[in-house]
Image (spheres, coloured by chain):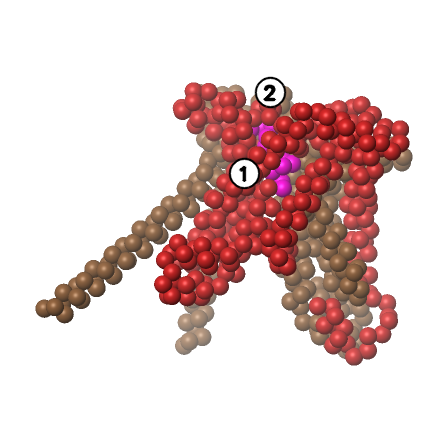
Chain colours: A brown, B red
Amino acid sequence: MEQQMSIEQVNRALQRKRNWAKAKKILANAFVYFVLLLMYAPLIYITVFSFTGSKTAGVWTGFTFSNYQTLFNPNNKFGQNIWSAAGNTVLVALVSASISTVLGTLGAIGIFYLRKKWMKNAMDFVTQIPVVNAEIVTAVSLCVLFVICAQVFHLERSFLTLVIGHVVLSIPYVVMSVQPKLEQMDPALYEAAMDLGATQTQSLWKVIIPDIVPGILSGFLLSVTLSLDDYVITAFTKPTTGGFETISTYVDSATKKAGLPVQLRAFTAILFAVILIVMIVMNIKSAQNAKNIVKKEKNKND
Amino acid sequence: MSEMVLAQNPKPRKRFNFRGSLCIPYGVFMALFVIFPLLLILYYAFTDEKGRFSFGNWGTVFSSPENWKVIGATFLIASVTTIVCILIAYPIAYLLSNKKYNKNKVLVYIFLLPMWINFVIRTIGLKALVNAFFKVFIGADLTATYPYVAIIIGMVYDYLPFAILPLYNQMLKMDKNQIEAAADLGANPFQVFVKTIIPMTIPGIVSACMMTFMPTMSSYVIANKMSENSTKIIGNIIEFWFGQSTSAISNHVGSALSLVMLLIIGISLLIEKSLTGKEDTKKGGIW
C-alpha cells in the first residue's frame, strides 16, 4: 500500500514537472512569437492600408486596388519615381557588392599571407575602421574628399562616388567573412599544388579560392544587404545633379515634402509578400533537408 | 597562423610574396577612401576657412548650449535603446539557440528578414502604427507629445536584430554541460542563470551593446522620422553642418563635431576591450 502511494506520488510529481516544462515551452514560444509579431507589425500595417486610397496610412476609406494600379501605371509620376529609385538601389547594391567581394577577397587572402606581423596588424586595424566608425562620420569624410575632388579635378559626385561609398561600407564585412575560411584551410594543399608544378595563379584559382567560396558568398550577400538598407552614406555620396535617388533617399525626401506617396504602400506590400514567400520556401526546404538527413542516417544504419 | 605556415616551410627564402601582394589593391583602396578622408576631417577640424591653424571650430561646437543638450540627449537615447534591446534580445537569443525551445533554425532568419525592407520605409510604417496605437491612451500623437519615447521605440525596433545576432552566436558556442553541471550540483535556476549563463555570454552581450549603441548615436533619419523633426541627436547636427549649412566654415565645424563622435567611439571601444579582456572582438561580429 505504502509502496503504491509513493509510486503514485512520484507519478504525480513527474506529471507536474512535465506540465511545468510544457507551460514553460508555451510561455517561451508565446514570447518569441509576440516579439516577431511586433517586428512585423509595421509591415502588416502598411500592407493592410495599401488596399485603401486614403492619403495617410491609418485612415480606411474603402477597399481598392488603385494604389497598385497607379504604381504600375507608366504615366503615374509617383509610381515611376518609385520604380526608378528601386532600380537604382538594386544597381548600386549589385555593383558595389561585386567590387567589394573581389577587392575584399583578394585583400583577405593577401593579409592572411603577409609575412610581417606588424603589416598584418595594420591591415586588420584598417579593416576595422569602417566597421566601428559611425556611419555619419564615414559619410562626411567621403563627402569632404569628393568636394575636394570636385574643386581640384572638376570631378563632380556621380554614380561612381556613390559606389565607392557603398564599397567602403561593405568591404570590411567581406574581408571578415573570408578570413575565418582561410584560417580553416589546410596550408599544405597550396604547397602541394606548387610542388606538383602549378603556377602561383593556378594554385590560387584551383586551391585557395574553391576552399573559401562559402565565405566569399556570405560576404557578397552581406554587402548587398548593407547596401540596400543604407541611407546616410548614400545621402552624402550620391550624384548632386540629375535627381538620382535610391529608395532610402527617395522615401526620405518624399515624406519631408508631403507624406508617404500612397503608391509606396503598395510597393512595400509587394516587397513584404516576396519576403513572406522566401520565408515559406526556406521553411519548406529546411523541413525537407531535415527529412533527407534522417533518411540518409537510416540508410547508413541499414 | 602564418608563422605556422612558415615554420612548416623548410626553406623560408626571401622570394616575392605573390599571395601577400594580393592585398595591395585593397590596401590602396582603404588608404584612399578610408584613411585619407579621416585625415582630411582631422585637418579640417583644426583649421579655419582660410586653412590657418585654429581652435575656433571647437569654440563654435562647445559654446553652443544646444550642442550640449543634443549630446546629452543622444547619450540618453542611445543608452536606453541599448538596455531595452538587450533586455528583449537576450531571452530571444537564448530561446532561439536552445534546442529545447527551437528546433527550427529558420526562425532565426525570420527575425532578420524585415531587414531586407528598407529601414526608412519600416520606420515610417512604425511611426504611423505607434501613433495610431497610443492615440487610444494619450489622445494625441506619441511622436509629438513624447518624442524621446517615440525615438527610442524606433531605434529599438530597427536595431533589435543587430542585438539578437551576436547574442545568438555566443549562445550557440555556450558550453551546455556547465549549465547542467550547475543544476546537478544544486544551483537553483536563478543561480544557474547568474553564475553560468551570464558569464559565458558576456562577449556576446558586449558586442550586442556595441552593435546597438554606436549606430543609434548616428542614425538621425530614425530620430527625424520618429520625432517629426522636433528632436536632434549628434547625427543631425553633423548632417546639418555638412549638408544644409553652406557657409565656408561649416565643413570645419562639422569636422570638429565628427572628431567628438570619433572620440566617443574610441572611448566605447576601450570600454569594450576592458570588458572582454583579450577575447577576439571579431569573433563576436554581427553574423
Question: Which labelled disc corresponds to residue A258?
Answer: 2
Q: Is residue B51 left or right of residue A62?
A: right
The mark total stands at: 2
Which residues lie in the magenta part? Answer: B214-226
Vertical relation: A108 (above or below) B91: below
Determine if residue A95 is in view.
no
Res B220 → quadrant: top right
Q: Nearer the viewer, residue B170 or B33?
A: B170
- How far separated are the C-alphas under marks 1 and 2? 29 Å
Q: Magenta stretch mostly in which secondary structure?
A: helix
Q: Is residue B177 left or right of residue A94?
A: left
Q: Nearer the viewer, residue B213 or A23?
A: B213
Q: Amino acid at mark 1?
A: Thr
Q: Position of residue A3 (x, y in %)?
A: 14, 70
Find numbered disc 1 in the image and state the secondary structure of the residue it sits on. Answer: helix
Q: Is residue B215 magenta?
A: yes
- Identify the chain of the residue marked 1, using the numbered disc in the image: B
Crowding around mark 2 (Cα neighbors within 10 Å: few <14, some 14 to 19, many 20+) is: few
Asked whether the residues under the numbered discs 1 and 2 touch, taking CB atoms below 8 Å apart as contact, a structural biologist would say no
- Identify the chain of the residue marked 2, using the numbered disc in the image: A
Give the residue displayed 64% in from the left and 45% down from the top.
Answer: B268
- In this view, the residue farthest toward the bottom is B10
Q: Is residue B169 magenta?
A: no
Q: Is residue B103 left or right of residue B165?
A: left
Q: Amino acid at mark 2?
A: Ala
Question: Which labelled disc corresponds to residue B81?
Answer: 1
Give the residue displayed 52% in from the left and 42% down from the top.
Answer: B83
Q: Nearer the viewer, residue A71 or A199?
A: A199
Q: Position of residue B85 (x, y in %)?
A: 51, 42
Find numbered disc 2 in the image and state the secondary structure of the residue it sits on. Answer: helix
Question: Which labelled disc corresponds to residue A132?
Answer: none
Circles 1 and 2 on the same chain: no
